[in-house]
Image (cartoon, rainbow, N blue to C red):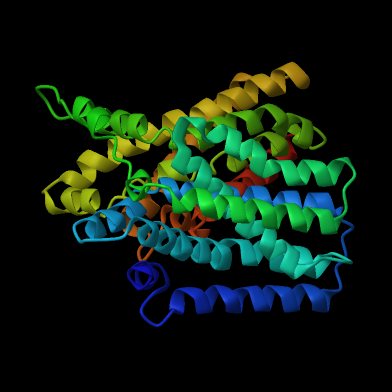
Amino acid sequence: MYCAFAKKLFGVKKEGLVRPLLVCAVVFYGLCTAEIRVKIHPFVFFLTIWTFTAGMMWQALHAESTEEKMQNLFMLPFGRTEMVFSYLGALGIYILVTRTFLLLSVLIAVMDSASLLCGILCAVHAELTAACVYADGRHGIWKGLLGAAPLLVFYVGGHKGSLVLLWLAEIAAELLILRKADAYVFCRRKSGGAKRLLRGGKRHSVWRYFLRYLWLHKNYLVNTAGMCAAACFLPAVLGGMEAQLGMPLGFAVLSLNTPLCILLSCDPSMERAVRFLPGQGKAFCIPYAGFLFCFYMLADAVFLCSWQIRLGGVTAGMIFTAACFALFSAILSVVLEWYFPIRGWKTESDLWHHPRKYVVPGIMALAAAAVWGWLQPAF
């Protein structure tokens, strides 16, 4: 069973692990050669690794693609413990190599003193904590707090040796908890909510599909909430710039809403259906652009309100500029998703962290510089 999951995640020849390791080696060597040194407290080092890895593991456990892989194996006879540890082992190694190792290579290269083994142990503990919280459902919050306890003890006044011992003790306890976990817990399907939402009206509506999709994937809205929160603080960061540059640059930053820009890439069956039917490119892309425009404009509106409260001076021209940036960001995002969809991904985390997400903000940042250069002579 481990081989079944491993081949799906790593590839037949483990090429899914080789490429990230090569990237980590190049990044580590480049930073070491540049002799960049940053003073980072050990608590911050471990907290960064722990929260990042736990978040990646949590995201992977909630991914629909991983649930589909498990459903295929549920049709065969299987041992409960074997299924759980095979699934979590393959998924944990994938997250560790493709995500955490890159962060570790950066931190260890720039820190004066850091331990690779302690960092890996911290990441393994974070993955097991996320798995225990996910397996326990509503009551898993207590296990999550218990998993964060070693870092709290270390922050209060412990030393690295006691932190390692606490991690080892909790890893042993978490393995015992997962040994008794039901394998079906890791394949939750919200069929009841889906059935209620799939009751359609008398006419087709792409907007209805978007609203249903967001209702079934509420985690996609977390990124939007995060962008709105960032919009509240951006004026404090960009306030030192001229308004003609700082405000368009803020609009460019707020166009980084990855989950909503991969609706076709993350659902290949939906993409095939859209491309198969005649005229669906226009029928889908125009509402999709309008849908993204609403979310981009929401973040820009929060940014404008925060700018007015902190700095003042918001004019009708700035509001028009925000609408233009939101519209062009939505159009560019739809064009990328329609003509350059992301292929060959293993988990949804690969989609959320694909380099393509920086294309639209980069183009809009260049547009912000162009707008500033065009307005500068007038002032």
Apparent side of residue 257 relative to residue 50 in the rendered image (left or right): left
Q: Is residue 144 visible?
A: yes
Residue 292: x and y, percent? 41, 36
Residue 305: x and y, percent? 64, 19
Quick check: 250 above or below 180? above
Name the quadrant containing residue 73. bottom left
Q: Is residue 328 visible?
A: no
- Camera-nearest residue between 236 and 13: 13
Residue 375: x and y, percent? 68, 38
Quick check: 371 above or below 17? above
Q: For the point 23% across and 34% down, which residue is it?
A: 191
Quarter holding the C terminus? Answer: top right
Q: For the point 61% across and 56% down, which residue is it?
A: 172
Residue 361: x and y, percent? 56, 48
Q: How many marks?
A: 0
Apparent side of residue 373 relative to residue 279 in the rendered image (left or right): right
Q: For the point 39% across and 58% down, which residue is it?
A: 81
